[in-house]
Image (spheres, rainbow, N blue to C red):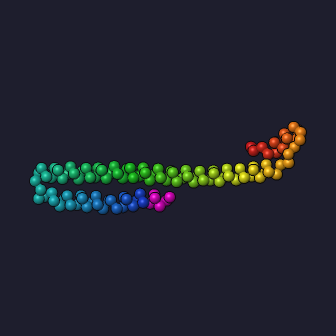
Amino acid sequence: MFNHVQDVDQCKEEGEPRVSQVMIVSEKVLPNTSVTGQETIHRDVDAVRSTWDAFLNVLQQTKEQLLTCVSQWKEYEESYDHCSVLLRKAENDMKMVDLKGTLKEKQDTHQKLRVN
């Protein structure tokens, strides 16, 4: 499960150089571009940066959610294991009980087997 969280980080590592490269290339072409083209390039670069920043925010939220899910799953497994042990013990205790004839004997046996 933790590998999936690392995969999320890898997306960031792969994308950041690409976004930086867009910025560098756009700065190189600006001097030889018309005013209208420069405005378009600035808008497009700003859109790329904005989209990337939004993606990073979603990526961080996803990572946090995955880590929360992993933690909750571990808690679930621990609870499940604990309950399984309790149920096996209760089942074994009940198998060891002799059938009783009177109400008093049944009540005493019930009190001994009762789970608190």
Considering only vertical position in the picture, is 20 above or below 115? below
Please give the name of the residue rendered at 85% of the width and 45% of the height, measured from the top-left corner: 99
Position of residue 2 measured from the top left corner of the image (x, y, whole percent): 49, 59
Position of residue 113 measured from the top left corner of the image (x, y, whole percent): 79, 45
Please give the name of the residue rendered at 16% of the width and 59% of the height, measured from the top-left corner: 29
Residue extent of the magenta highlight = 1-6
Q: Main secondary structure of the magenta part?
A: helix
Left or right of 76 on screen, residue 57 = left
Left or right of 105 on screen, residue 82 = left
Position of residue 116 measured from the top left corner of the image (x, y, whole percent): 74, 43
Figure label count: 0
Left or right of 103 on screen, residue 65 = left
Left or right of 90 on screen, residue 65 = left
Considering only vertical position in the picture, is 17 above or below 62? below
Please give the name of the residue rendered at 74% of the width and 52% of the height, measured from the top-left corner: 89
Please give the name of the residue rendered at 79% of the width and 51% of the height, measured from the top-left corner: 95
Between 98 and 31, the one nearer to me in the picture: 98
Residue at the farthest top position: 103
Position of residue 33 measured from the top left corner of the image (x, y, whole percent): 12, 56
